[in-house]
Image (cartoon, helix red, strand yellow):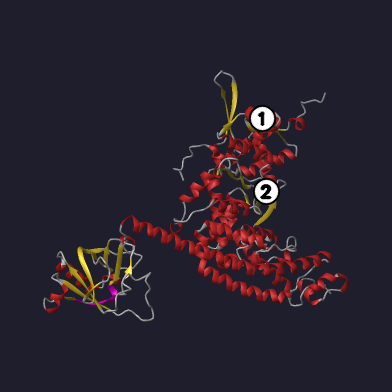
Amino acid sequence: MDQWDYTSGMLLPGETVAVVQSHVRVYNGDDKIQAKVDVGRATLTTHRLLWETGSLKTGLLLGKVQKLDKESKGFTAVFSGRSPKIIVHVVPSQRQQPRTADSCPFIKEKPTTFFKLGFTQGGLDEFITKFADILRQKTWEKLPPAEHNRRLGILGIERDIDDEATRTEQKISEAFHDLKSLMEMAKPMVQLAKTISDKAAKIAARTSEDEEDAETVRFRKQLLNLGIADPVTKDSYSSRAEYHLHLAMEICDTLDKVVLDAGGMMTLVEAYCRINRARGLLVISPDDLMSACEMLNKAPNATLSLREFDTEVKVLQHISFDEDLQLTQVLSLVEERGSITPNECAITTGVPMFVVQQSLIRAEALEKLCRDESVEGLRFYPNLFLNSGSIEAS
Amino acid sequence: MRRRVGVASVVNGKASDHLFTKKSSEIDQNAVGKLGANLDELKEKLKWFASKHQLELQTDAAFRNEFLTMCKSIGVDPLASSKGYWTKYLGVGTYYYTLAVQIIETILSGADRHGGVMLLRDLWIRLERHRPKFLRDSHISFDDIFHALKMMKPVGKGCGYIKTSSHIDQGLVYCVPEEMKQDQTLLLKAVGESGKSYFKIEDMIDTLGWRGSRVKTAVDQLIRDGIAWVETGADATGRQCVHYWLPGLFLNNSFEDD
């Protein structure tokens, strides 16, 4: 009877109870078992045959059952007692895995190929019918262990959560471990690249470079691939990858009309959104955009150019943007209205606030307008101090 | 004849002697070639890593953050170029480039109301609502938002986050054309920490300990940029007083109209 295990009393994932019968006596082969108490409750489930008495809880996996017999009333019945019995034939346990007292409740019993269940208070017929059904259907094989909707009760759910958490934890710690190993591989490479880069930078700084050799171009590409800032690249256009030039041309094509509609000027931040929306899945980085915009003046037939204001705001400016024209428009509007705020100006001319603000500020710098900042906002007036003869210095 | 300088000269010693210091001979002759071979190895490792963990990068914010932190510690910026290995094989960049677009569009869409300044909490709620179906179960973290904003710096200095002493989600994110001046950020921070979406000049003088004129200058700038609105009225005693409101901090921001 060493095929039996100790059990916890809890059901396995997906396991359901088929029939329960109390006052069932267990026999090892034809003999009574050595335990003092040999009568208990037998439970048949889709996966196991369980038997409990007092504090002893045991179970037998149904996969180990070969066949069932009903004990015929006859000569042996006389010796075994009056109760009807089921004979359960089991597969012999493998010799390679000797059982220990810890794992096997019936370790003291002599090895047999069958055991009996004696039904001292009836219930055999129902039991054996269900037992036969289950053995025929092999129900323990059908249900996968992780079938969530067959969980029974809170214990089952809790086990689910624990399993999931353990699996996730394992996955995550594995992921972090892999990440560390990846970084450890990359680190010396980065160091090497930086060393070469620094040396090359020192040399380049001392000379005026006209042209770069193929190796340098390739090296710069490697820096780009690794995501290391190239100290030499910053000012020299020649080291920009061809990729950025193509990107510059693409930006012109895609954003030409959009920038025009926006009044001839668009902030790079907005341009970043627009170009990425247009590109769909192949989005570019802000650095890519910057590098590409810096190459706009090298792109053939470029209709856009990069412009940076004193305020460090970067914009894409359309080739047709005529600053002086803008200025004139704005000035005439101020004359007409007497004074104007950037907001009013934007609404009237249909040009974005940002562009209009630049024009107004430029006009102020050219001494054509004066500002009045108050609690009501910013308002621009014609500069009467310089442009009108009626104010006398006194 | 043009003198060709560059990496080749470093390793092959083609440049004239006076350009070389003793140090440069320390470079291994095959340094660049070695780097090239190493990079091929790295490419393979990245592909392997991607096959195992690419989904985690897309769905697990903590893992993503750890990834970026580790990159920084070894001296690389994986978000710098969309052509770099990190994006090409792991798709890290794509996640943040797209997130940045969403952040900017979300902030700018409300700019006529709040001038480009809003609560981090509000931004996060809006971003979460527009997640694509397949990413519904995973969330954007605040760290993600901070990384994306920082990434935008080369293109626009007017993107950032103002930390307040309150909970992290009560900080302010902003996307404005010009770089925010320090006084403005300090003022916004103070208002954020007050827990109210309005303030009076007198309150700010007390809180910040500045002169009135300094507070006024900062406030005027905020008004000009459309971040603060002015309300002149009378208080309980009938005296004229001016309140300044920051719509970006309104507590009951409606999410119906997105």
Tag 2, which secondary structure? loop
* B164 or A151: nearer the viewer: A151
Residue type beneath disc 2: Val
Above or below, A373 against A11 in this view is above
Residue in the picture at 42% in, 59% down: A162
Residue located beneath label 1 in the image: B205
Q: Where is residue B19 drawn, in percent x and y?
A: 86, 70
Q: Quadrant of the C terminus of chain A?
A: top right
Q: Where is residue B26 drawn, in percent x and y?
A: 80, 73
Distance between the alpha carbons at the discs numbered 2 and 1 = 31 Å
Q: Where is residue B150 drawn, in percent x and y?
A: 63, 52
* A376 or A98: nearer the viewer: A98
Give the label, 2 or 1, closer to the camera. Answer: 1
Left or right placement of residue A156 versus residue A306 in this view: left
Q: Quadrant of the N terminus of chain A?
A: bottom left
Residue in the picture at 51% in, 62% down: A172
Span shown in magenta: A62-68
Image quadrant of residue B80? bottom right
Tag 1, which secondary structure? helix
Above or below, B171 against B1 in this view is above
**Label 2 close to label 1 by CB (< 8 Å):** no
Q: To which chain does the residue with label 1 belong? A: B
Q: To which chain does the residue with label 2 belong? A: A
Residue in the picture at 77% in, 26% down: A391
Picture disc at residue A309: none
Does residue A276 show up?
no
Residue located beneath label 2 in the image: A313
> Within the magenta stretch, is there residue A388?
no
Q: Residues within 10 Å of mark 1 (few under 14, many from 20)?
A: some
